[in-house]
Amino acid sequence: MRPARALIDLQALRHNYQLAREVSGARALAVIKADAYGHGAVRCAQALEADADGFAVACIEEALALRAAGIRAPILLLEGFFEADELPLIVEHDFWCVVHGLWQLEAIEQAVLAKPINVWLKLDSGMHRVGLEPAEYAAAYRRLLASGKVAKIVLMSHFARADELGCQRSAEQVAIFEAARQGLTAEVSLRNSPALLGWPQIPSDWVRPGILLFGASPFEETNPLAARLQPVMTLESKVISVRELPAGEPVGYGGQFVTPKPMRIGVVAMGYADGYPRHAPTGTPVLVAGQRSQLLGRVSMDMLCIDLTDVPQAGLGSTVELWGKHVLASEVATRAETIPYEIFCNLRRAPLLYTGS
Ligand SMILES: *Cc1c(COP(=O)(O)O)cnc(C)c1O
């Protein structure tokens, strides 16, 4: 079989979840949208369910898949419903539901619900993506209460720049949130991963960690709490061909890399069809036979080339870590001018194998 695979360390996932709770002192919804950022939502939910206060996903399709797999814990729909006809299913499966727009509030008011639902009322505190405007927030809260359709309301908002530790925008967003919720007595949920790790002074009865669960830091700078995260995914494959090349030979599509000296090249069964970023340049780190080395030339669909010149112990069949516990996904992401969120979500074809369950 083709040796490309992603090993998912569920013990590390549980460690990271516990760290989120310990650091925040709050209840934590494990954000496992987008198939748990490529890590497999059902298996991740099963591994966390005994500990987790609940889960959060992007849409009802993702939530129903978790229920179908037997997950009984609370599940928050981060964008609520997209169409009002989802409301009966939300009631039936006890999903918690974000309300981020007036049309959703009106749909709840007009719906006939078999029982009241839990709503997370979202304020646009300055990210300007979704959420109610500050001027309409308190009135929306009171309308929801008055509707009789709602059992509990949590007040929430989302940060645009919490990953920038020197940036004041998060503090401004908190001030806008505090002003908008004046006089409303309800639990609060503000902190995503970067706010959880980087902004301890921001209040949050509920935190919503996503990327940190998977062991990747949301920051570009080093951070003492982020340093305690354990990478969950190891993307690995094997060397399937070795080439000894003289100086002056091009390697891969476009001949973008030309050997500056005699070199030993390893070809690895991994490519952009597996989700390895095509834009990772020559020099992107890899680990081969336990030693750090580098990518050479363009990434192809099913293969990529690495430097074995100074790794004499490596050869045909050597294991290569593309990212994991030694080469961090964030290092690869930075080289490819993206973020670990995207490279995790892009993972495909390579099977997921679970350890530590
Ligand atoms: C995705 C998401 C999160 C998790 O964000 P991370 O940066 O991965 O921690 C939290 N809250 C909302 C509303 C989200 O959409």
Image (cartoon, rainbow, N blue to C red):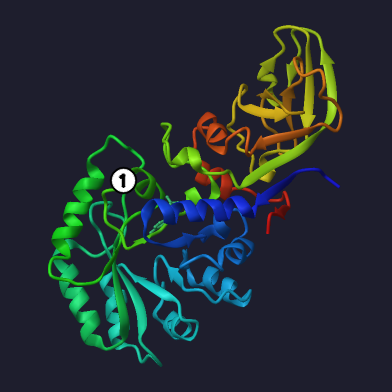
Mark 1: few/some/many CA within 10 Å (<14, 14-19, 20+): some
Look at label 1 and name its amino acid. Trp
Quadrant location of the C terminus? bottom right
Of the four image quadrants, the one with ligand 1 is bottom left
| Residue 154 picture location, percent across and down | 30, 70
Indicate whether 227 appears above or below 62.
Answer: above
| Residue 285 picture location, percent across and down | 62, 27
Residue 258, picture quadrant: top right
| Residue 233 picture location, percent across and down | 63, 46
Front residue of this view, candidates 306 and 230: 230
Residue 157, picture quadrant: bottom left
Residue 250, picture quadrant: top right
Residue corresponding to mark 1 = 199
| Residue 167 picture location, percent across and down | 26, 37
**Left or right: where 48 falls relative to 249:** left
Number of numbered discs present? 1
Look at 54% across and 77% down and name the residue there.
Answer: 72
**Left or right: where 70 falls relative to 20:** right
Front residue of this view, candidates 319 and 21: 21
Which secondary structure lies at badge 1?
A: loop
Front residue of this view, candidates 272 and 313: 313
Look at 63% across and 33% down and name the residue there.
Answer: 326
Look at 23% across and 56% down and name the residue there.
Answer: 125
Look at 62% across and 38% down and name the residue there.
Answer: 325
Q: Is residue 339 visible?
A: no
Disc 1 beta carbon < 8 A from ligand 1? no
**Left or right: where 324 falls relative to 52:** right
Indicate whether 223 appears above or below 207.
Answer: above
